Image: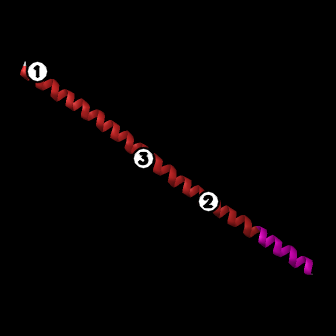
Amino acid sequence: MKEQKKDKSEKDAGWMKSSHSDTNMKLLSKRTDQKARRIAGWRKSSHSDTNMKLLRKERIKRREGLLMEKQT
C-alpha cells in the first residue's frame, strides 16, 4: 500500500511540475508578445515620424518654389 501512495504522490508532483512549467511558458510568451508589440509600436511611430518629415520637406520646397516664382 505504501508503494501505491508513493506512486500517486509522484504522479501528482509530476503533474504539478508540468502545469507550472506550462504557466511559466505562457507568461514568458505573453511577455515576448508585449515586447514585440512595443517594438512594432515604436517602428510604426518612427515610420510615421519619417513620413511627416518627408511631407514637411515637400511643403517647404513647395512654399520656397512658390515664393521664388512670385519674386521673379
The residue at 13%/25% (across/down) is 66
Spatial CA distance of label 1 from label 3 is 40 Å
Crowdedness of circle 1 by 10 Å Cα count: few (<14), some, many (20+)? few
Relative height, residue 14 to residue 49 (above, below) = below
Quick one: SS at disc 3? helix
In this view, the residue in front, 60 or 6, is 60
Q: Amino acid at mark 3?
A: Trp
Relative height, residue 26 to residue 39 (above, below) = below
Q: Which residues are magenta?
A: 2-14
Q: Which mark is residue 69?
A: 1
Relative height, residue 23 to residue 37 (above, below) = below
Q: Choose the circle earlier in sequence order: 3 or 2.
A: 2
In this view, the residue in front, 4 or 67, is 67
Judged by depth in the image, the label closer to the viewer, 2 or 1, is 1
Principal SS element in the magenta part?
Answer: helix
The residue at 12%/22% (across/down) is 68
Q: Choose the circle earlier in sequence order: 2 or 1.
A: 2
Spatial CA distance of label 3 from label 2 is 24 Å
Please tell me whether residue 49 belongs to the stretch shown in magenta.
no
Q: Choose the circle earlier in sequence order: 1 or 3.
A: 3
Residue beneath label 3, please?
42
- Report x, y in % for residue 9: 82, 75
The quarter holding residue 57 reads: top left
Q: Amino acid at mark 1?
A: Glu
Quick one: SS at disc 1? helix
Residue beneath label 2, please?
26
Relative height, residue 29 to residue 54 (above, below) = below
Q: Residue furthest left?
A: 71
How many marks the image carries: the answer is 3
Q: Which mark is residue 23?
A: none
Quick one: SS at disc 2? helix
